[in-house]
């Protein structure tokens, strides 16, 4: 029998509520200060018109509170939500709404019985810039980042939007000999084309209308450190030639100046576009392309490394948990399952925004599936393509890179690469259950373990 506790001084409210309760629910009517309200197994209805909206605070931390009001103003509704009421109902009460809310609360309580406490003390302290994850893909990425950071060459970081390309660039800067030196970000798409040259190279007083004083450009600001060109594919063709000369000489002329400026910066660039295709279409200079991609790092999308979702959730949770209306202890297992089942077209940025939204809307002490109802509803869908097209889009970049490096045994390497991604995705989908992953793939468990390089 589920106890429903009603805090009110009006007997007619109890008479209205009692016949609307589903079978198996017992209504206990109490005054403003009931001793039985300490029972965390009860659901509490509070008549905020008679006992006061501030009473919600006393019980919201222990159980679910439903506020009831007769007022036709938005003020009491907003106050009740601010104080922690799970739901606010206006009189006259409706049976269908009460049924829905009580069923929802029962399901939430059952879901929260299987919760994961996220303790910040269990999260290992990290450097200022850290790439979070534990998948094979992210481990390989980190190894490559660490190696390239030690060599003073330009780096091109590729990957879909939201994968963390700027984070990779910051990691390269921090792991290099330029740690602690300036790290200047230039968003090629955000600065208007007419201003980009002067922002990049600086200008002299009187160089153009409005230039009442000289200004130091971003490249000079970055002297001794690193400059990160984000969205390099958006750089106007007119500026690409000037950037190429700078890459060759590490020198430039500020706008309106005849005096050459020499600097020492490391250039890292990033794009979510296919620069090779842009070169063929005449939208990007081929010589600049080769100058920028002396070293290439590709950041895989989140859907290919779902094993990283749980550690990412832990990290992002503690980055934003302080913004919550009430203390949130962690997430439910069902919440994590919902995140793992989604493909994340917006990648880590979408995951972070989803968590921020869930924290903002959370009505309980754990993030639950209730906060995931709109997951994916506002995402921009990737262009539809058949299975063959999707596979080709994943394999072709790998093959192109191998051909450019003049690798040998490319056929075997492609098979090994496809196997690695396939097995990792299957294991992520089955939460590391090897037997289930082998069953879904149509191979036996021993074959799976052999391909994973594990002993019997």
Image: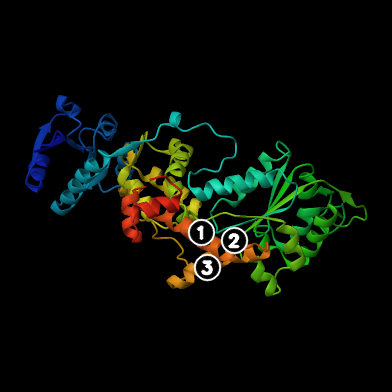
Is tag 3's residue or tag 2's residue first in the polypeptide sequence?
Answer: 2
Q: Name the residue at 48% across, 72% down.
A: 389
Q: Residue furthest bottom?
A: 281
Residue 35 appears left or right of 270? left
Q: Tag 3's secondary structure? A: helix
Residue closer to the observer: 400 or 372: 400
What's the residue at 70%, 63% (across, down)? 235
Residue receiving disc 3? 393
Callout in the foreground (3, 2): 3
Please indicate, yes or no, whether residue 385 appears anywhere in the rendered image.
Answer: no
The residue carrying pointer 3 sits among few (fewer than 14), some (14 to 19) or many (20 or more) residues within 10 Å by Cα, namely few
Kindly identify which numbered label has been placed on residue 272.
2
Q: Position of residue 200 (x, y in %)?
A: 77, 54
| Residue 416, numbered circle | 1
Determine the image quadrant of residue 256.
Answer: bottom right
Residue 349 can be seen, yes or no: yes
Foreground mark, 1 or 3, reads: 1
SS class of the residue under badge 1?
Answer: helix
Earlier-in-chain disc, 1 versus 3: 3
Quadrant containing the C terminus in the rendered view? top left
Labelled pair 1, 3 in contact (Cβ < 8 Å): no
Q: Is residue 395 left or right of residue 8?
A: right
The kind of secondary structure element at disc 2 is: loop
Q: Residues within 10 Å of mark 1 (few under 14, many from 20)?
A: few
* Left or right: 275, with 207 as reference point: left
Q: Position of residue 41 (x, y in %)?
A: 17, 34
Frontmost of labels 2 and 1 is: 1
Is residue 289 positioned above or below 349 on the image?
Answer: below
């Amino acid at each position: 029998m589920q106890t429903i506790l009603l805090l009110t001084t009006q007997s007619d409210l109890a008479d209205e509520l009692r016949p609307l309760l589903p079978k198996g629910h017992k209504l206990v009517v109490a005054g403003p200060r009931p001793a039985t309200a300490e029972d965390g197994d009860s659901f509490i209805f509070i008549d905020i018109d008679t006992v006061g909206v501030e009473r919600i605070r006393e019980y919201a931390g222990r159980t679910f509170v439903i506020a009831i009001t007769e007022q036709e103003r938005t003020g009491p509704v907003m106050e009740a939500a601010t104080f922690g009421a799970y739901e606010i109902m206006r009189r006259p009460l409706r049976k269908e709404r009460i049924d829905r809310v009580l069923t929802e609360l029962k399901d939430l309580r059952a879901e929260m019985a299987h919760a994961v406490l996220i303790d910040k003390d269990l999260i290992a302290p990290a450097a200022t810039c850290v790439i979070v994850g534990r998948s094979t893909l992210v481990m390989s990425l980190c190894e490559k980042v660490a190696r390239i950071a030690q060599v003073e060459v330009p780096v091109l970081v590729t990957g879909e939007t939201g994968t963390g390309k700027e984070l990779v660039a910051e990691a390269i800067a921090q792991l290099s000999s330029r740690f602690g030196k300036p790290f200047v970000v230039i968003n090629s798409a955000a600065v208007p084309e007419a201003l980009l040259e002067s922002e990049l190279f600086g200008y002299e007083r009187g160089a153009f209308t409005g230039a009442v004083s000289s200004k130091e450009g971003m490249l000079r600001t970055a002297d001794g450190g690193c400059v990160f060109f984000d969205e390099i594919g958006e750089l106007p063709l007119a500026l690409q030639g000037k950037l190429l000369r700078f890459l060759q000489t590490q020198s430039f002329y500020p706008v309106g100046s005849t005096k050459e400026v020499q600097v020492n910066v490391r250039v890292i660039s990033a794009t979510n576009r296919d620069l090779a295709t842009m070169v063929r279409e005449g939208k990007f200079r081929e010589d600049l392309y080769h100058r920028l991609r002396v070293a290439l790092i590709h950041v895989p999308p989140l859907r290919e490394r779902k094993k990283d979702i749980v550690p990412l959730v832990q990290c992002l949770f503690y980055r934003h948990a302080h913004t919550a209306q009430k203390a949130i202890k962690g997430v439910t297992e069902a919440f994590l399952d919902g995140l793992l089942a989604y493909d994340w077209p917006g990648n880590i940025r979408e995951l972070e925004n989803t968590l921020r939204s869930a924290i903002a809307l959370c009505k309980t002490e754990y993030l639950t599936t209730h906060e995931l109802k709109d997951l994916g509803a506002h995402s921009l869908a990737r262009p539809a393509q058949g299975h063959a097209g999707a596979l080709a889009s994943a394999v072709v970049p790998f093959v192109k890179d191998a051909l450019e490096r003049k690798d040998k045994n490319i056929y075997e390497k492609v098979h090994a690469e496809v196997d690695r991604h396939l097995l990792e995705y299957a294991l992520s989908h089955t939460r590391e259950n090897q037997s289930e992953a082998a069953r879904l793939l149509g191979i036996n468990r021993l074959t799976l373990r052999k391909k994973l390089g594990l002993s019997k």
